[in-house]
Amino acid sequence: MKKLFVFILGLATTGAFAQGFTAPDAQYIKDNYTKTEYQIPMRDGKKLFTSVYVPKDQSKKYPFMMDRTCYSVAPYGAGYKSALGPSSAFVHDGYIFVYQDVRGRWMSEGIYEEMTPELEDHSSPKKIDEGTDTYDTIDWLLKNIPNNNGKVGVWGISYPGFYTTTALLSRHPALVAASPQAPIADLWRDDGWHNGAFFLVANFGFYPGFTNRQDDKPTQRRGGRFDPGTEDGYDFFMKMGPMKNTNDKYYKDTIRLWNEMMDHPDYDDHWKARNVLYHLHDIKTAVLVTGGWYDAEDLYGAINTYKTLVKNNPHTPIYFTMGPWVHGGWARGAGDHLGDIDFGGPTGPHYRNDIEFNFFSHYLKETPLALAPVNTFETGTNTWKTYNVWPPAPFTEKNLYLLPGGKLSFSAPDKKGKDSYDEYVSDPANPVPFIADRNQTMDMQREYMTADQRFLAGRKDVLSYQTDVLDHDVTIAGNIWANLHVSTTGTDADFVVKVLDVYPDTASNNKFTGKDVKMAGYQQMVRSEPIRGKYRNNISKPEPFVPGKVTEVKWELQDVLHTFKKGHRIMVQVQSTWFPLIDRNPQQFLDIMKAKDSDFVKATERVYTSGANPSFIKVRVL
């Protein structure tokens, strides 16, 4: 969510760009729909701006399809959206489309809260949240929009995905189908921090454009865009210095939402209140959760929204789809590649036509539905797989051990062998870049999630371990856990683990392979995650490392469905900087958001590879 690209996406997926960034339905919509704007009253007296598009053909009744958004329902006034609904199929099938500016955004009244804390107690009109706002909106629509069939569906991507999740909490009986897509579930884990490491480049440029008002006065004014004067984010953020300089040099404490992030680096009550997963119980609405394996913003949200819904609501129809997509990639375009990686053909149309459209049509119009509970795209083999549950069974949990000499093996090191380790110097003044082209580092380039890692071959502060050439396919499904034994000469340290698919030297280029790129020997990133070491035991209570003491550090790398094919190798890389994707750690135990230039020091990091102190990643092998 947290970058300007997604701000544009918020408009694009509900406006002119929704179908492949074109507007093929613009004239059809004007000819066949009537647009009306309303200020819908909430139980506390605030009014939310809502645009409603009703079919001109009033010979039959229609269900509602609603998108609640913080990214604007524009155009306001006489103008029409040039795309409606999740895809073109909905426009031509006939629905009443509803778009609403959420409380405190754009033309709606109220004060905006980032990821509004949801409540369990709604006993008084003052106890409001996104769930109550959705309930009041649905109730008003049913009573005031003629020719509706009494059924409501809700969908949304990214932040609107969060509002779709909170729509479930309305528990309105007319809400029969919902599809949270790339939903934010827990802002600290989704967009702000990954295991305590702050996602710098994704967040820094987002808030100026997102902040178009900081009061309760409706407006159509857009926020300003921060201009860094360069696309070299690596250089820009190095010159910026410590995180406190985001305000000292640039924002000057003028952006409330940015300050909330800077003031709450730990997973404290501020963030716990914004974890919507706690509230996903007693849900009766059918749900289709959608995400992308290469969603750089909200991978956590999609996977954990699904897992929580299934666990807490065993008798409710819960569907799950994961494809080879970037953030929102299923909603537009072919979805046939990412960077150099070819997915074997279009994947987006299959989702839009065969999964999403059929799901809503069934629950809103009672058409037949033949849809497996879980539809996932297996990367590596480029095939769709269906399952009854996720992660699928049967599977075998196995450990891939980091061994001396840069080896990686399913065989554990000898417990009686001597202690062994690899070490490197982590220097905050020379952090490891997260992509090869520094002129693309002012934004979180979506291609980084599959990018070739050979550009790091000369770095002494990146450790690499790889298996022998595989003599059979290895398919892993579900989450990956990193389990390292480490030591540091500092009192804090970041660790990044990346799981790579190393192509054979005989691999051929494909039609998407970039200029001057060779797929032979390609090191494709499959999954990667950092951890800020001080959160290794408790994300709410950071604690320092004892310099030189061997310490176990464990964290989740999130789910995959990937096959490492026969003839390939599996590689694991370990490093301590990843810049400017994540902010720099001073490598001293302190509040990093308040650190000074002088606080940043070099540290020697050791990763142990012995039987006594093993380091490994835990995977589920199908």
Image (tube, rainbow, N blue to C red):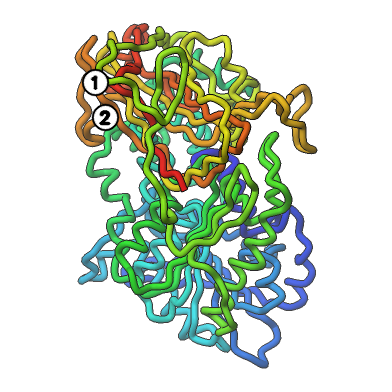
Is label 1 or label 2 in front?
A: 1
The residue nearer to you, when weighing 467 against 69, is 467
Disc with the residue nearer the chain's start (1 vs 2): 2
**Residue drawn where x is 49% and y is 77% of the image:** 152
Q: Amino acid at mark 2?
A: Arg
Residue linked to disc 1: 551
Relative image position of residue 126 (x, y in whole percent): 25, 65
> Could you tell me if the residues under marks 1 and 2 are in contact, i.e. CB atoms within 8 Å?
yes
Residue linked to disc 2: 536
Relative image position of residue 275 (x, y in whole percent): 32, 51
How dense is the environment of label 1, judged by Cα within 10 Å: few (below 14), some, or many (20 and up)? Answer: some
**Residue drawn where x is 31% and y is 20% of the image:** 414
Relative image position of residue 156 (x, y in whole percent): 52, 60
Q: Write down the quadrant of residue 317 in the picture.
A: bottom left
Secondary structure type for disc 1: strand
Total number of numbered discs in the rendering: 2
**Residue drawn where x is 59% and y is 83% of the image:** 367
Q: Amino acid at mark 1?
A: Thr
